[in-house]
Amino acid sequence: MYSLRQRLADWVLRHRRAAFAVFALITLFFAAGLPRVQIETVFSDLLPTDDPFVQVFKDHPNFGNPLTMVIMVQRKNGTLYHADTLQKVWDLTRDIDLAPAVDHDQVLSITTTKARYAEATPYGIDMQPLMGDAPPVSPKTIADFRNRVDRSPNIRNFLVSEDDSATLIMATFIEHRIDYGETFEYVQGLVENARDANHDIYLTGQPALIGWVYRYEWQMAGIFALTLLALFGALVFYMRNLVGVVTPLITSATAAIWAFGFVGWLNISVEPLLMVVPLLLTARSFSHSVQFTERFHEIHAEVGDRLEAARRTMRVMAAPSVLSILTDVLGIAVVIAAPIPAMVRHAIFCGMWAVWLIPTGVVLISLLLATLPAPRRPVRATGGRSDEYARSGLVRLLNGIAGLTTGRRAAVTAAVVIAGGGAAVFTALQIRIGNPVEGSHLFWHDSEFNTAVRQINDHFPGTNTLEIVLEAKNDKDPSWTAQQLDTVRTMLQLQDDLETGEFPPAATLSFADYLREGNRLYNGGDPRWMPLDERQRAISAAATAAMLGSSAKAFNHVISFDAQHSTVSLWYPDNKQETVDQALATARAAVEKVGVDHEAFTVRLGTGIIALQEAINRVVERYHHLIVLLLNLFIFLMFSLAYRSVVAGILLLIPVNLSHFTMVAAMHLLGVGLDVNSMIVAAIGLGVGIDYGIYLLSRICEEFQRLDGDWEAAIRAALVTTGKAILFTATIMAVGILPLYLLSGLKFVADMGLLIMVIMGINMAMSLIVLPLLVNLLRPRFVRRPQPLLGERIDWDQEQPAR
């Protein structure tokens, strides 16, 4: 009686022309969607939708807005109070105000009208911009300008460095209008043109970070092309026949067209930084194709007919291939549960790519094997060995591995595996979630972006803020404003507690700071009046003095335009995870001390770069463990049913989990943090291990039946046949991906390239050593039984060939 897979193989290969036509039509349909593919970043889609910090950000986007570029102009020798330096700052400020998608109301520097000074005169309070209609030129006007800066405390703290050598220009961009690549290239062009013998110019900020990633897109595309060329060369070297080279290329290319065309028709964008994942999926496709083709060669050597060999190969390999690919699909699909829209879209893209590996890696490859010219020199693997391969170094190596997992050496190997596994688990548990470096771990330490971050952090409070928002309960009540006594008192108490605490920020800022200056001016300019008089009338007078002659938009970084909401901004020197943890801990303590619920407002923690980074990290921490747990459960249930044995499910879980912990340990030792970008790569890495394990375990079952129950001979035979394909695929994938590590200008892409190589090597070792070792030591009963679904042995004498 034919099974479903037998009937499918018979029907497909009996109707090859119709099947090829169906594949051609589907491919043309998806190819038509390729021009619609969008590779772009949408910042808000990188944030988890259900996190309270993100909700604060969406409710108050002006407070600590991360879509801000920061330019630092630094004079190499001396202070910035030179005519040419001030002219440069003036020009850069006006030029960046012309940048695409800039918010003209949120451009700030010492040359803008928002940077103001005030002084008390006999005629009242005089409020003027620091710089007039043109930058100062003469020594007297420059000296006057410097004097005005020195009398403006907030300017001194946040726009001019302590040593007077540098100043900042800040510009915020409108998210729904920004094209990060276009905007970055414009601003970066200004920066590059402004550099000269006397000045260093540095650019940082989230839009610049995304812009640098965009700039490296073409480099990544070139490296990917080189990687594919290296994989092609490895195929040619190893296979040395048309079938072995062409089938992986065609099936992998077809799956890629279907995947990109699918998201093109869905009109969803692909995150550029995660384009390394499709490369891993291409490696997975190559791996399946090589396993499939290797099996075809062996069967063709026995039957001598390519059509019959293709049919039997499809019947033998269909179930192991489909089940191993489904593990990949689940590992990616679990990511969809994460409440990050960009991750959901990428999971759909990569998940469907993995799904397409089933029709292309099982059906299309069988059609190609039945159609392409058969290899002239067939591979003979009778008994798992041949004279040709017995003389080869590859088989000698595999025989040596077999010797480690059988006989007297097995106990020693087991002890080494247990010790190594324990060390891997211990090291893996040390990995930190989040950013491990100052700046961004996406770039190399000496990259232009990270250098800019360090320079700005050295001269200013930093670029990373944490915002504590004081939100009005009834923002429709015009009688209530953030200038109320209770609000101002709460701001001041928060600042005082945080500045005197165990982990003080580099600087703090609130509307109360402007009120202090206003209070001094209102009282004749006497510095003794800087402390606020805690009476409502005095607070209102100070607010009037502070905002006199200014637009309300000049204060929208600390108070909303309608004066209903306000924020306390805290600056920190970096966004390393330990800094994030300490900053949030002290902020929570300060908020708890002042109280969350007040009569007219609520204190909400928080927004800003520090809070948003923590929001993302919490998702990673939560869903990383969920992914591992669900994959373990799925693998256990699926393969316990497939092999009709609970022991089989456990047996496959052991090397898979050892591989996972070893991979995470390697990430920790390489300095790669666990974040949303690396999480999906790690998830797919779990699927690689089960792929190798299924093929090898199924082959052990087959060889055990053929060799009349000789355990050691069955393991050895499986290693020198299926193990050979595993060794080859892991090796060529690692070699092919090497250019990604050696040539990438993005540290993250290089790290992921190295991680993929580590994944391949670890899973190869676990499959070739740990799994056979477990089978030999446990000698489970299910291996003794025929495996109708996953066992690779076919009773060819009882089959009726379908022509």
Image: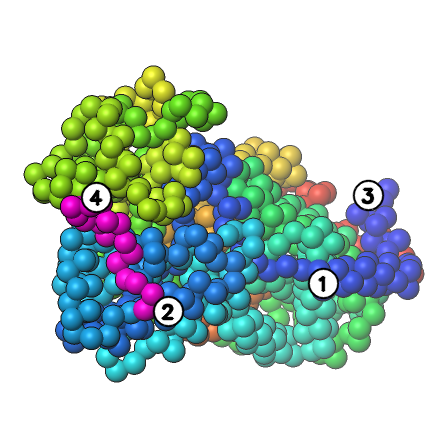
Q: Picture quarter containing residue 83?
A: bottom left
Residue marked by disc 2: 92
User: Looking at numbered disc 1 in the image, what kind of residue is underneath it?
Assistant: Leu
Are the residues at dot 3 and dot 2 in contact (C-beta closer than 8 Å)?
Answer: no
* C-alpha span from label 3 to label 1: 38 Å
Earlier residue among tags 2 and 4: 2
Dot 2: within a 10 Å radius of its alpha carbon, few (fewer than 14), some, or many (20 or more) residues?
many
Residue marked by disc 3: 3
Whether residue 95 is situated above or below residue 268 in the rendered picture: below
* C-alpha span from label 1 to label 4: 67 Å
Query: Residue visible at 54% across and 72% down?
Result: 218
Whether residue 471 is situated above or below residue 739 in the rendered picture: above
Query: Looking at the image, which is closer to me, 468 or 720?
Result: 468
Earlier residue among tags 3 and 2: 3
Earlier residue among tags 3 and 1: 3
User: Which image quarter holds the C terminus?
Assistant: bottom right
User: Looking at numbered disc 4 in the image, what kind of residue is underneath it?
Assistant: Gly
Residue marked by disc 1: 34
Earlier residue among tags 2 and 1: 1
* C-alpha span from label 2 to label 1: 40 Å
* Left or right of residue 468: residue 725: right
Which residues make up the magenta segment?
Answer: 117-134
User: Looking at numbered disc 2 in the image, what kind of residue is underneath it?
Assistant: Leu
Q: Secondary structure at mark 1?
A: helix
- Depth check, mark 2 against mark 1: the one in front is 2
Residue marked by disc 4: 124
Q: Secondary structure at mark 3?
A: loop
* C-alpha span from label 2 to label 4: 34 Å
**Residue 120 placement (x, y as % from top left):** 17, 46
Instruction: From the image, give the main secondary structure of the stretch colored magenta.
Output: strand
